[in-house]
Image (cartoon, rainbow, N blue to C red):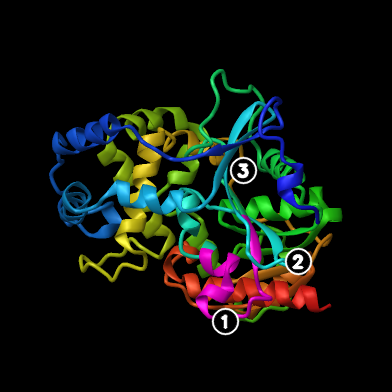
Amino acid sequence: MSDYKDDIKYQGSEASVRPFRIHIPQKDIDDLQTRIAHTRWPSQLPGGAWNRGIPVAYLKELVDYWQKEYDWREYEQKLNAFPQFMTDIEGQPIHFLHVCSPEPNALPLIMTHSWPNSIVEFMNIIGPLSNPRAFGADPSMAFHIVAPSLPGFGFSAFSEPADGTPWSIKRVARAWAELMRRLGYDSYGAHGNDAGALVSPELAILDAEHMIGVHITGGLGIPKGDPSELEGFSAEELAEVTHMAELFAGGSGYAPYLSNRPQTLSYGLNDSPMAELAYLIERFKEFDGWPSNSEEIQPEPIDKDLLLTNATLYWLTETAASSSWTYYEGAAGMPTDQKKVPTGVSHGGGSVFRRIAEAKNNIVHWSNRESGSHMVAMAAPDSLVQDIRVFFNKLCSL
C-alpha cells in the first residue's frame, strides 16, 4: 500500500480530491425551524397503534425536542472532526470521510452506509476502528477508514445536470474501486450495512484482486426464491426463515411504492420537514421490528440525537428524495452471492441462514449478535467494532 498523501491530486482534474468541511448557512437552519413551527398536524386516526403509522403524540414529542433542544451545530462540529473530502467520479460529486489511523500497519477499510441513512451511521465506530489504542484496544487491529456518502445521499447530492446513466449498485461499486485507487490503496477490505451490504459484495466481484475480504451486517442467507435452497430443512428452521423473510419484505408497502413512483413521494419529502422526519422514523422503526399493535412506547434502540442528525442532514442537503434511487433502479434487495473473496457476516441470524449462505459464498466468519436494530453501528457500536476486528484479524492471520 502506498501513502495516500503522495498519490492524491488535490486540484486540476476530474480525479482531484478536494478537502471539504461542513458549514450549513444559518439561514437554512432558521428556515428549518420556521417550517417546523408552522406544521399543520393531522388528527390521530382511531386505534392509533404503531401499525397505522407513526402516532401523532410520539412525533410531536420528538419534534418538540428537535426544535427546542437538538443542536445541529454540535453535530456539525462532531462530523467535522473527521477529515472530509470531495472528488468527482463519472461526473458525480462524491463526498467521503478519510480517517487515517496513527498505526502504520493499519488496514484500509471502505465502509458503505445504509438507506435511509448517511455517514452519520458510522459516527460512533470510526474512532475505535481507526485508533484502537485510544480506546484501550489492541493497536494491531487498526483501520484506515474511507466512508463515502452514496450518490444522491447527503453531500454526494446528485449533480446538475445529472448524469443520465442510472446509479445501480454495480455502478456505485465501480466508483468505490476508483475512489480507493485514487487514494493509493492497493489492498483493502470493505464493510457495509443494508444498501452498503449490497455494494460491498459487488465491489469484491469487481475489484477482487485488491480486496482481502468483505464484512456485512445481515442479508446473506435470505432465500431468493430457489426451492433447492431450503431442501432438508426442518419445520422449525423453515419457520425461522419465513419470519426473517417477512421482516425484510417491507410491511408498510414503501418498497413497491419507491420502486414505481419515487418522484411523487419526493415532493413531500423535499418540502416538509415533518413529512421527511415521519417517513425516516417509520423506516427505522420498521427495520427494528416495529410497528406493533401495541400503543406502548418501546425503548429506543438508537439515540434520538443520532436519528435527528441523520434527518437534519437529509433536510439540509435536500437528499431525502434523491436517496430513493436504490429502489427505483432495482438496487434494493439482498446482497449478491460471491466467492471471489472471503465474507464475514455479523448480526446475520441463526445457523440456518449461514447454511444457505455458505452454498454460494466463502463464509469464514458468522455471528448472530443482538443489536436491537437493523442500524447496528448506531444501536450497538461496540458489538459491531468487535465483530469487524474479529473477521479481519482472521483474514490477516491466514
* Earlier residue among tags 2 and 3: 2
User: What's the mark number on residue 236?
Assistant: 1
Specify the quadrant that holds the N terminus. Answer: bottom right
The magenta segment: 127-145
Per the image, the residue denoted by label 2 is 228
Which amino acid does the dot numbered 3 rest on? Answer: Ala
Name which quarter of the figure residue 373 lies in.
bottom left
Amino acid type for the residue under numbered disc 1 = Glu
Does 359 appear above or below 69?
below
Ranked by sequence position, the earlier of labels 2 and 1 is: 2
Label whose residue precedes the other's in the sequence (1 or 3): 1
Q: Is residue 194 left or right of residue 204?
A: left
- Measured as percent of width and height from the top left, residue 198 is found at 64, 52
Residue 331 circle label: 3
Say what secondary structure mark 1 lies in.
helix
Tell me the kind of residue under disc 2. Ser
